[in-house]
Structure formats: structure tokens, C-alpha cells
Image (cartoon, rainbow, N blue to C red):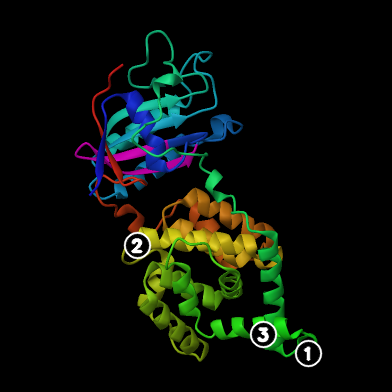
Amino acid sequence: MSTIVRAGSSAEFLALVPHLLECTPHRSLALVAFADGRSIGALRVDLPDPAVGADVDVDSVASTVIGMACKISRADAIAAVVYSDRRLTDAEDLPHRQLVDAVRSRADICGLRVTDALVVGADGWDSYLTPAENGPLPLADIEARDDLPAVDGDQLSAVALPEIARASVETVARLLTDVEHLLSRSRAAKRLSGRHRSDAAKLIDVLGDPPAVFEAAVASDSPLDVQQLAAMSFCLQRPALRDVALMQWVGDLATGDATYRAQFAFAEGRAFPADLARPMCGEGARPEPTRLLRALEACRQVAAASPRAERPGPLAACAWLAWAGGRSTHAGAYADQALAIDAEHGLAGIVRTLVGHGRLPEWVFERPAATSPAGTGSSHGSRAR
């Protein structure tokens, strides 16, 4: 059951927004969607680059974000929040007012009521609808909620890969190299020590059942061991196996097995089943959020443990999983990391294009009512200044 956290004032609402977004936004426009007075979703986009100046098409930005808000099922109202680096005290007007006006206008056209439009600056906060008479209000008003977990970092903080012990990284690299030697029956394979040959042979045995490898990776929140890291790295570097993993993680083990068999059939010239391919484009039933998050964390560990040349595959998997979970900012960042290593990487390029065009899976907009990352909904009432 969801917990309802009431926000009876704008300041209380601003304290809740980071929990809905899972970050403290920086240089961002955030929209929170409501149904019957309760939050049912939130989205964040980068603010237009001030260096671009008057060339920024604020109407286009407004149309994009309101269009996404309209796709959230049951949404009947929104609240907009601008997070700016600028000082509000020194400005003749609140920053990005033209953008906020465009958002309000587009929301009205689409039948969405605007409950509030706020700005958080470097020295205070205020409202575009009813600005404070004596200048911005103090940031101290926006106090952290004692009844909710702390939110650390901005929208890109979570993209940093986890720390993996150096010994584990070296072992993963050795296992991958040894497996390649054994599979190719190279001369180097004959020079492997007994232990290294045995370790590589065990990994090859594990790789005989890729869906089992992928399922084990999301079976719990426990960190992956060295063999799991190496097995996952091997698979995610290979597009056919990587796609099996992604479709299995948005589905289940049976889906993974079916996709694995379909890949073999496709290689022999048979058509790939459309129902198995649809989720790759963001179509189909809504995946289990916890399963997606576990898969993403597993792939982050694999990317961190893999040699740099072998990272694009795991990073592209991170990008797609983040996109599948509605985290387009993270998806773009992971895709960029992959493309910085391999500029021609297919999946990374596809995700980068999807993010650039503001496209998300349809299932992202099918959120249950009154939820947030901590299982908490919000009820935003009238403003109390």
C-alpha cells in the first residue's frame, strides 16, 4: 500500500519533488503530474542552454514536456518547478519565465490544470503565479522531510559506475582473455596454467546457458561475483546474447529462453517473432520495476569490471535499461560513455537517438496511482505562503 505524504504548502511540495525524481535537479525543469490531487508521475528535462539565448524554441520544449505529461494515464493537473543556478534577488524577473508561460499555455490547451509554477534559485525560491512581494523566499523553507529517505546527488550522480576491487577487475580481464583463447583454440591456450585453464573451462560451462546467467544476475540485490561479472561481460559484448538478456529482464526466464531459441532460428534464416521483438522498441506490457533496477545495477557492475575496450556492450545495456525504466537522462549518459569508446556501437547509437527525440517506452506512462521511488505518494494542496 502506498503511503500518502501531504504537501499543504509550496515549500512542503518543493521538499517532496526530489523524492519523486530520485535526485535533486540541477538546471532543470521538472513537471509533477497529478490525478485527483495525488501525484502519479514526475519528469525532468534540462533547461535551455542560456548560451543559446533567444534562439531557444521554448514553445517546442513546452510542447514536448506537456506532451509527455499528457501521456501519463489519469493525469488531470501538473505543477512545474524550475531549478536555476541564478540568483533571484538580482534579477528583474524570475528566470525562464518565457518557458514557464509556454508550459502553462500548452497545458491549458491540453486540458491540464496548472496547480503551481515555482522556481528554486541560488538564493531562494518563488512562484511565477503569485510572486512574493518582498523578493524570493528563503531556501531554508524547503526543509528535508524526516519521514522520507535522503536524496543524494543531482540528475547525473547516479550514472557514475560503482567501485570494483582492482583484484576483481584483473581477474575478470584474465578470465575473458583465457576464455577467448580456449574457444578459438589458439596457441596461447596451450600455455595456460592448469588453474587458469580450469577457471576458463568452468566459465565456458556457465556460458552454455545464457538465460540462466541473466536470471541469476537479477535474482537478488547481492553484488555479482567474479564469475558472474565475467560471464555477463562476455554475453553483453555480443549483440545477439545482449538482446536475449534485455528481453528476459523486461519479461521472465521463459521469455529469455524463447528469445535465445529465436536468435538461433534467425541466424538460420527464419523470421524473428514479432512479439519477442516488440519490447526492444518500448512496446508491450509494463516490466517489473524492481527487476529492471536489479538488471541495471548488475550491468553497471559489469561495465565497471570490464576492460575499457569491452565496456561499450555493458554500457549500452545500461543505457537501454535506464531508457526502459523512464530514466532518459541516465540513458543518454550511458550511451555517450559507450560511444566515446566505440563511436559505431549500434545499440548505444539507437538509445542516444531515442533520447534525443524525447521518446520513451509506452509503459513508462502507465504508472500506478500515488507512487514515488520510496513507495510514497503526495497530495499537493493550496499554497500557504
Q: Mark 2 packing: few (<14 Cα in 10 Å), some, or many (20+)?
A: few
Tell which tag, 3 or 1, sits nearer the viewer: 3
Q: Earlier in the sequence, mark 2 or mark 1?
A: 1
Residue at 53 percent of width and 77 percent of height: 241
Q: Residue pushed farthest top?
A: 134
Tag of residue 74: none
Residue at 65 percent of width and 81 percent of height: 199
Region of the chain picked out in magenta, as a range: 30-46
The three-letter amino acid code for the residue at tag 2 is: Glu
The secondary element bearing badge 3 is classed as: helix
The three-letter amino acid code for the residue at tag 1 is: Lys
Q: Which residue is mark 2?
A: 288
The secondary element bearing badge 2 is classed as: loop
Q: Which residue is at the front of the view, 324 or 171?
A: 171
Q: Are marks 2 and 1 in contact (CB under 8 Å)?
A: no
Q: Quadrant of residue 179?
A: bottom right
Q: Which residue is mark 3?
A: 198
In the displayed structure image, the side of residue 287 where residue 268 appears, left or right: right
Tell which tag, 2 or 3, sits nearer the viewer: 3
Q: Which residue is mark 1?
A: 190
Q: Position of residue 282 (x, y in %)?
A: 40, 63
Q: Earlier in the sequence, mark 3 or mark 1?
A: 1
Does the segment drawn in magenta span residue 45?
Answer: yes
The three-letter amino acid code for the residue at tag 3 is: Ser
Does the segment drawn in magenta span residue 126?
Answer: no
The secondary element bearing badge 1 is classed as: helix
Q: Earlier in the sequence, mark 2 or mark 3?
A: 3
Quadrant of image for the C terminus: top left
Q: Position of residue 306 (x, y in %)?
A: 65, 65
Determine whether 217 is above or below 203 in the image: above
Query: What is the magenta segment's predominant secondary structure?
Result: strand
